[in-house]
Amino acid sequence: MAVTQESVLDKIKEIVPKFGVDPSAVTLEATLEDLDMDSLDVVEIMQAIEDDFGVRVPDEDLEGLTTMGDTIAAVVKNG
Amino acid sequence: MSDQTTREVVITGIGAVSPAGFGVDALWQAALAGQPLPHGDVAVGPDPSEHLSIKESRRLDRFARYALLAAREAVEDAGLDFGELDAERLGAVVGTGIGGFETIDTGIDILKEKGDRQVPATTVPMLMPNAAIAAVTKDFGLLGPGHCVVSACASGNHSLGEAKRMIEHGYADLVVAGSAESANRPLATAAFRAMGAMTSKGMSCPFDSRRDGFVMGEGAGMLILESAEHAAARGARVYCELAGYGASNDAYHLVQPDPSGRGAIAAMTKSLAEAGVEPGAIDYINAHGTSTPYNDLAETKAVKQVFGADSTPPLSSTKSLVGHMMGAAGSVEAVICVMSIRDNKAHPTVNLDQPDPECDLDYIPEGARELKIDTVLSNSFGFGGHNACLVFKAK
């Protein structure tokens, strides 16, 4: 699967219900705080993305992320 | 304790989740009804996720979910408003026998199927035995002392006893105390079956000649312990006093009780002494009563040595009704003791149709019994040879 902003966003929307998050709230502008998500949730998202897309995002690229857009950009950069 | 340097500890709230369902009422009604468990070696508890949000459930192993639900019931039952209390003086002790077995089991599956990079980051904080107390203290904002007590099937009684110590020695005014267990996972059941601890006949029948192991249960029991002054100051309803706690080790065998009963006798004797009562004052004993061949005989002999063969009060096994909830057993049985004092009723031991000639005490086989119950002894003996006994006294 091509690693694009759109495909990664779709993947995240697909998995967030198990975190108790409404997929429609997942936008590029939404912050982790808006979504009531924390660093452990980000790890879980990254594991799902690595499993699906085969993309491994180094820890240093995950530091200081605040929005979904930042998170997705880190994935796309390493895709 | 009669020592004037210690404070009286009372019970003001109770909560339970058990194979009988959610809540103390479900547990107590099932116990009094004396309905035997369905055939099998596991008594499954209700799904705790029914009463928790997705966000709450996904960070908690099943045992910690049970602990949280039972704690919420106990807190509500005690009429607590934490906003009005000094959080620094509120403690917690939440024990377990094993910890997050669901998380261990699923984590191993993920490791084998998908490799080490897919193992959830939450694995350790969910499987650790103190995950339940972490959830309970966070939920209510309890800032005082707290820890997790682990002593196999004695964890519940040890937790309540250690909570009692915190209050009577002044380290906390109120402690949310109890224990939880959920180990109905393939690794655990295979291991318990391999050691012959679980019944191969699909029946929990303590003190019966056919007994050959326990039925595994799951759930949690939680109680609100307070200093008597703290309870009075907030006008709390008091169920009874937690008057005595006695603990000992067998230092004998990893999983078999010392046949001399030395450790069990010591724990019972210490708890009676601390409560300031003679054996003759005990109206009812909530037995450990696991339905294993070793335990029920050793317990019977030990009880007879403490109370006298002809003067032992009636005793019954909660494990015959809800299975052996292991680390949760002692605190669920403490809830039973509280209800026994409140209602002056003792629940039966079920499936006791063919008594073992060597188990010759009054185990209340016929059904729930009306009995004036002011003072109760509750026994718990764990793998590892850990013994913990509690004495409850009517106020």
Image (spheres, grey):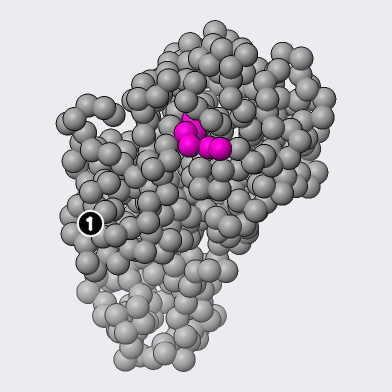
Residue at coordinates 50% horizontally, 27% vertically from top-left? B282
**Quadrant of res B324:** top right
Q: Nearer the viewer, residue B310 or B120?
A: B310
Residue B376 drawn in magenta: yes
- Which residues, given as a range, are shown in magenta? B372-377
Above or below: residue A10 compared with residue B266: below
Residue at 48% in and 37% down: B374
Q: Quadrant of residue B164?
A: top left
**Residue B151 visible from this viewpoint:** no
Q: Is residue B168 above or below residue B53?
A: above
Q: Is residue B108 one of those drawn in magenta? A: no
Q: Is residue B238 left or right of residue B170?
A: right
What is the three-letter code of the residue carrying label 1? Ala
- Chain ID for label 1? B
User: B123 or B220, which lies in front?
Assistant: B220
Write down the residue under mark 1.
B233
Residue B236, position in %: x, y?
Answer: 33, 58
Image vertical order of residue B231 relative to residue A47, above or below? above
* Location of residue B387 in the rendering, given as x and y in whole percent from the top left corner: 46, 24
Q: Residue at x 17, y 31 (%)?
A: B5
> Residue A55: horizontal and vertical position, in percent?
44, 71
Q: Tell me the element at label 1.
A: helix
- Asked whether, in this view, residue B21 is left or right of residue B73, the answer is right
